Image: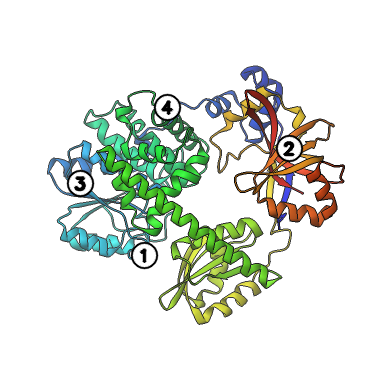
Amino acid sequence: MYVNNEKWFINTKTGDFNFIMNTFGVTASTARLLINRGKLTERDIREFLYPDESMLHSQSLLRNLKEAADVIEEKLSSHLKIRVIGDYDADGIMSTYILTHAFKRLGAEADFYIPDRVKDGYGINADMIERAAEDGVDTIVTCDNGIAAVDAGEAAERLGITLIITDHHELQEELPKALVIVDPKQPEDTYPCKNICGAVVAAKLAAELLERKGLAEKGKGCIDYIEFMAIATICDVVPLDGENRTVASLGLKKLNSLYVKGIGDVSKANKGLKALVEGCKLDEITEYSIGFVIGPCLNATGRLDLADKAMRMLCAEESEKAHSLARECRELNEERKAMTIQETEKAFKQLEKAGSLDKVLVVELPECHESLAGIIAGRIKEKYMHPVFVLTKSGDIMKGSGRSITGYNMFGEMQKVSGYFLKYGGHPMAAGLSIKAEDVPAFRTEINKNCTLTEDDMKKKVMLDAAVALSAFDEKSIEEIKLFSPCGTDNPSPVFGDRNNSVIRMKRIGKNSNYLKFTMEDSRDVKFEAVCFKDAADVIEYLSYKFGQDQVDAAFAGRPNSIKLTISYVPEINEYNGGRSIQMKIQGLI
């Protein structure tokens, strides 16, 4: 059944509507959206609506970056071997590519290594340092990892390897022994945007090196890598405000112009990325395309295979090889999707069979690939709005990933029952663990015994930009909504709400008839079309439960019925058979 686990609020921030409307020539609804996002001054609004290259911060503002570049320059002049060690997610892959590509442009003897998720675990470790020493590596530069690698730092010091760490994660109590650490999260670092991803840190270092050698225009060295920075920024779910919004916006523009439309010098397009875009049949690249199409193809290599497959695709110099590797990445993602759907359905059935739900869900999927546990935990959390742990079998133990909800500090609660774990770690919203199978029942009992969440806590808080009928929008105000893209953390997609929307008719749509289309009448008695991309069977079951099966049957037949819905929605323009009309895309309904 469709689960209504949301609690809706209306954003009521105040600001000078007339100033915004008159200065920027926008509609009142756009002024409302800007005010809701805290954009009140002319400078803030201009930077938000019209980001450009001048808004990218200088790499010189990153603490220790010049020192890192000095060391690398010295190593380059001495022709010493450099190895880049990244991570197996999209940010790590993009970071690794940026640095590896820049080092090759600089004529360095450089290679890369991306950890094997199962064999190596996350980040650089002592074994990788030892292997690098055996391979004659003089210098290791990490990207998107390393800030917690204390054992690796000790191994590097012991073996005489120069270790340079570039990362963006939070600092631990003990920092690793490294010659240079570049991480904007360092307390002494005054970089204006503290939440940049690993690929942006890597690109800033690459820019410094390339600009020093005259291989990039002064102050614009990272622009060459803007599409890779954008993919990483969006996939790593960092706040899309300030410089991050600029990176994402400029990267999307380049991806659409160069990679989709072929505008500009197409010889400068990365062959592997272009092959992936073409293979995914994308005629427009948005933050959604990156987050749910391109990103998963990259991540699938690190989940079910080795992430160096994605790296080899990006490094491919021949189009045929690039397309072959891009196809393999897509196929791995399709395999990953099928496995995820299968195991998620198992999880849902397990929870439905249990009847009443624990406050903290502990779901055992012994046959599930361990790399999928986090994705499945996230899907369970989104459906039920409970904290959840998904456990998979790995040899003689259970390994798991947890995903939390606002108000439940998952890592803090795990600390209270840490005696059950063989290993664990995380933060308030996500965690990982390993545990003996026989200890799972006791863990489930104790983690729930300590939980103080209320029913109200386990509802998703949705902030609506305004309560307004769809008929209040015109084409201009809907087109202006596009200015708020790319949306994400700290810049949510605009969402509106309206009560008392009467259903005149509904029908199933989609290839598998798994979505719904409604003809409705809003609170102003204006008719409109609406589409709902939630699972049709779930929504129909919910409507039958709330209004009665006879009323649902009447709505499908286009007969008078009593169904009235309160809806959260996004207004959009539907173009069909040469005509244009305003329609509603339903986000939630009660």
Q: Give whichever of 370, 171 is nearer the camera.
A: 370
Q: Earlier in the sequence, mark 2 or mark 3?
A: 2
- Distance between the alpha carbons at the discs numbered 2 and 1: 48 Å
Q: Which residue is mark 3?
A: 110
Q: Earlier in the sequence, mark 1 or mark 4?
A: 1
Q: Earlier in the sequence, mark 1 or mark 3?
A: 3
Task: Give the side of residue 338 with respect to residue 13, left or right.
Answer: left
Numbered disc in front, either 1 or 4: 4
Q: Secondary structure at mark 4?
A: loop
- Distance between the alpha carbons at the discs numbered 1 and 4: 39 Å
Residue 179 coordinates in the image, percent (x, y): 26, 52
Q: Amino acid at mark 1?
A: Val
Q: Amino acid at mark 2?
A: Thr
Q: Which residue is mark 4?
A: 261
Q: Does 299 appear above or below 108? A: below
- Distance between the alpha carbons at the discs numbered 3 and 4: 33 Å
Residue 375 coordinates in the image, percent (x, y): 51, 57
Q: Which residue is mark 1?
A: 118
Numbered disc in front, either 2 or 3: 3
Q: Amino acid at mark 4?
A: Lys
Q: Quadrant of residue 495?
A: top right
Numbered disc in front, either 1 or 3: 1
Q: Does 135 appear above or below 20? A: below
Q: Secondary structure at mark 2?
A: loop
